[in-house]
Image: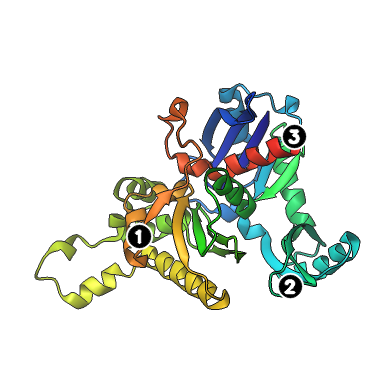
């Protein structure tokens, strides 16, 4: 069995999974619990360990999970607190490689006074330079690990294994889809505090970027436009979605076109623009890369009209990355794609146990 935990900035998500006799992964339990509710003002940066602790303990009780009896719980550290980079290095033994990558890690993560913590996976020989290897480097800081571990232990779980959001999302993707032989697939995970974009293909480098626009920023924009508190804006976001920032008069044929143009420049446009810039950057830096399929997940991906808005602005087709795909037992679960990180963690746990 394996427990995957996603300590999100809006909700805690947990998936309990097992392998059946044929080796297929089965989800046995799944649930989510808001980290904080009913606040008229909310700042994800000010969330305390106690918030995640209370939400997680309520959720484990509801699911009938005894944290102390879970051997190796897998939890994921937010992508904004980690760096995941594909690098090309000279062939060397693992000790030399670890020393080299620790130096490299300092270039990619915001240092907080503590030493970097790294993990890496050798992907194989580089196709262009045969004396070099492609390596996937995952880096964070000791302080980030300690803070995450504190949350985990406070809920009753053991330290277990730590993963990173981009890696967990990639594991979920790989469980359902084959990497394209040509071009890349794109994963977009819209959380509450940041959006993770991942590009990946067999012949192209693994790439990920964190965008500082997500559900929290949507709500803040609604607060400012309508001059209301956070809780009121959150309710409007969930009901009206993308239209929550539209002017009431915008449907009138007599409205000044310039006014319409200003009204349409919203936080949702900013997210689409940042996604477009990131995709263009990847295209320019990855020779002969092209985009195949787009998958979306995360709790804020369910903001009404957002998927359609992004698809129209980027001129693409998008489908949800749903870890409950084909699972009739969980067909009534709300917002299934918000479990993508937790499911990726659970998969890692089953692999580690085998």
Residue hosting label 1: 311
Residue under the point 49% across and 43% down: 338
Residue hosting label 3: 354
Residue hosting label 2: 107
Alpha carbons under labels 2 and 3: distance apart: 35 Å
Q: Position of residue 88 (x, y in %)?
A: 73, 70
Q: Position of residue 205 (x, y in %)?
A: 62, 66
Using a 10 Å C-alpha cutoff, classify the residue at mark 1 as few (fewer than 14 neighbours), some (14 to 19) or many (20 or more): some
Alpha carbons under labels 1 and 2: distance apart: 34 Å
Which image quarter holds the N terminus?
top right
Work out whether residue 104 can be spotted: yes
Specify how the rendered protein is coloured: rainbow
Q: Is residue 266 above or below residue 160?
A: below
Alpha carbons under labels 1 and 3: distance apart: 39 Å
Which image quarter holds the C terminus?
top right
Residue under the point 28% across and 56% down: 243
Q: Nearer the viewer, mark 1 or mark 3?
A: 3
Say whether disc 1 or disc 2 marks the residue closer to the N-terminus.
Answer: 2
Q: Is residue 38 above or below residue 263?
A: above
């Amino acid at each position: 069995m394996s427990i995957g935990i996603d300590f999100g900035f809006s909700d805690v998500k947990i998936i309990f999974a097992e392998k059946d006799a044929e080796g297929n992964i089965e989800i046995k339990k799944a649930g989510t619990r808001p980290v904080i509710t009913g606040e008229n003002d909310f700042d994800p940066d000010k969330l305390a360990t106690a918030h995640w602790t209370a939400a997680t303990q309520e959720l484990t009780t509801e699911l009938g999970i005894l944290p102390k009896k879970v051997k190796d719980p897998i939890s994921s550290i937010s992508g904004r607190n980690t760096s995941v980079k594909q690098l090309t290095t000279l062939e060397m033994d693992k000790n030399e490689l670890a020393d080299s990558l620790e130096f490299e890690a300092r270039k990619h993560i915001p240092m907080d006074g503590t030493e970097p913590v790294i993990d890496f996976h050798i992907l194989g020989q580089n196709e262009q330079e045969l004396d070099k290897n492609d390596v996937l480097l995952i880096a964070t800081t000791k302080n980030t690990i300690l803070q995450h571990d504190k949350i985990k232990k406070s809920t009753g779980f053991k330290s277990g294994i730590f993963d990173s959001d981009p890696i967990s999302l990639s594991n979920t993707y790989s469980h359902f889809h084959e990497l394209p032989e040509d071009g890349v697939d794109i994963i977009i995970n819209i959380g509450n505090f940041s959006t993770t974009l991942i590009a990946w293909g067999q012949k192209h480098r693994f790439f990920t970027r964190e965008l500082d626009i997500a559900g929290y920023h949507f709500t803040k924009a609604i607060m400012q436009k309508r001059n209301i508190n956070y809780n009121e804006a959150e309710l409007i976001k969930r009901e009206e979605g993308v239209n929550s920032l539209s002017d009431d008069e915008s449907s009138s044929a007599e409205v000044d076109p310039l006014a319409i143009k200003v009204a349409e420049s919203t936080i949702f446009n900013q997210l689409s623009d940042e996604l477009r810039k990131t995709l263009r950057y990847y295209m320019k830096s990855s020779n002969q890369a092209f985009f195949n399929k787009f998958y979306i997940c995360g709790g804020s991906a369910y903001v009404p009209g957002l998927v359609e808005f992004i698809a129209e602005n980027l001129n693409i087709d998008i489908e949800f990355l749903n870890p409950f795909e084909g699972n009739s037992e969980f067909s009534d679960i709300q917002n299934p794609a918000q479990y993508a990180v937790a499911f990726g963690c659970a998969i890692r746990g089953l692999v580690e146990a085998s």
